[in-house]
Amino acid sequence: MTDIIFHHYATSPFSEKVRIAFGIKQLAWKSVEIPNIMPKPDLMPLTGGYRKTPVMQVGADIYCDTQLIMMELERIAPAPTLLPKGREGEARALATWIDRNIFWAAVGVVMGAIGDRLPEAFQKDRSEFSGRSFDPAKLRAAMPAARDQTYAQLSLAEEMLADGRAYLMGDTPTLADCALYNPVWFIKERVGQGKAVGPLDRLPRVMAWSERMKAFGGGKRSNIGSTDALDAARAATPARASVDPHDPSGLKAGQTVSVTPDDTGRVPVSGELVGLSADRISIARNDPRVGDVVVHFPRAGFIVQPL
């Protein structure tokens, strides 16, 4: 199997969502530490401009967004599964709800607590990333509302765990658990230094669950340099992809398209459409530093347009 190369940084919460999946599956992976703000000169040749963290690389195939990264990990290492048989849609739907709702409430808690201690360069970068001014005073003022929303939504997980189950959907962890671990870990580590703080201090089952998740670790990590990752892409050939000829978009293989996140980090990536399904969009690109690569995005949450 071609090496899994993971481009991330230590404090990235969405990276932790994937790192815990590495732990559950006990996967070997190669770590490339990237900057937490732009510029990211050794990542852009791979992604074509996509700037969010994390990114997963397998040879010359580049996977953006944790929605798709997690599905690709399931394909690479199907056991133990994160998608229980017969309940795959339920696990994915829960994960999407968590990513789009609980995560952003948790960000409000964290940024309200530490925003005024973050470097000016980080504040400027996140203003550009989100399209909104990063104002520490406003974030601190909004923190009580963010805390209350986080508490209200995490209370649903507390209720799910009330019957004694170990994980959200039963006796084994699923994609939903990995998604929920992301915002819980973010609050614990950045605000509580690993301990329960509001609103987590009112959620004992969620806290106990988070410790069970933490025990999985982060898989079998080895570190490499960013130039090694670029060399790996140049030496590889992208896997074959296909475009559904009956896709409701009407897009056809070979068209030049752009793909853009619909929420934050709205930097379009353009290339030749080589893969399209209900789950993913795949575009072929060429860069002098890596040669031919295919960049893959999830379909949900991304806008694909012909150019």
Image (cartoon, grey):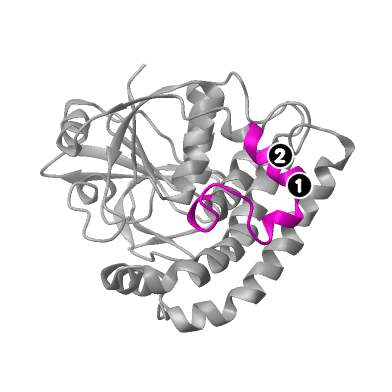
Residue at image position (86%, 42%) is 162
In the image, residue 140 lies in the stretch drawn in magenta: no
Left or right position of 220 against 44: right
Q: Amino acid at mark 2?
A: Ala
Which residue occupies the foreground of this view, 102 or 196? 196
User: Is residue 186 in view from this perspective?
Assistant: yes
Determine crowd level at label 2: few under 14, some 14-19, many 20+ residues with C-alpha closer than 10 A.
Answer: few
Residue 289, x across and y down, in percent: 12, 42
Q: Amino acid at mark 1?
A: Pro
Above or below 303: residue 67: above
Residue 246 placement: quadrant: top right
Determine crowd level at label 1: few under 14, some 14-19, many 20+ residues with C-alpha closer than 10 A.
Answer: few
Q: How many marks?
A: 2
Residue lying at the far right of the rendered structure: 163
Left or right position of 117 against 177: left
User: Is residue 245 in view from this perspective?
Assistant: no
Q: What span is in magenta?
A: 189-212
Q: Secondary structure at mark 2?
A: helix
Residue 204, x across and y down, in percent: 76, 47
Residue 10, x across and y down, in percent: 37, 45
Residue carrying label 2: 208
Q: Secondary structure at mark 1?
A: helix
Left or right position of 93 against 279: right
Residue at image position (55%, 47%) is 185
Q: Are marks 2 and 1 in contact (CB under 8 Å)?
A: yes
Residue carrying label 1: 204
Residue at image position (22%, 33%) is 229
Above or below 268: residue 15: above
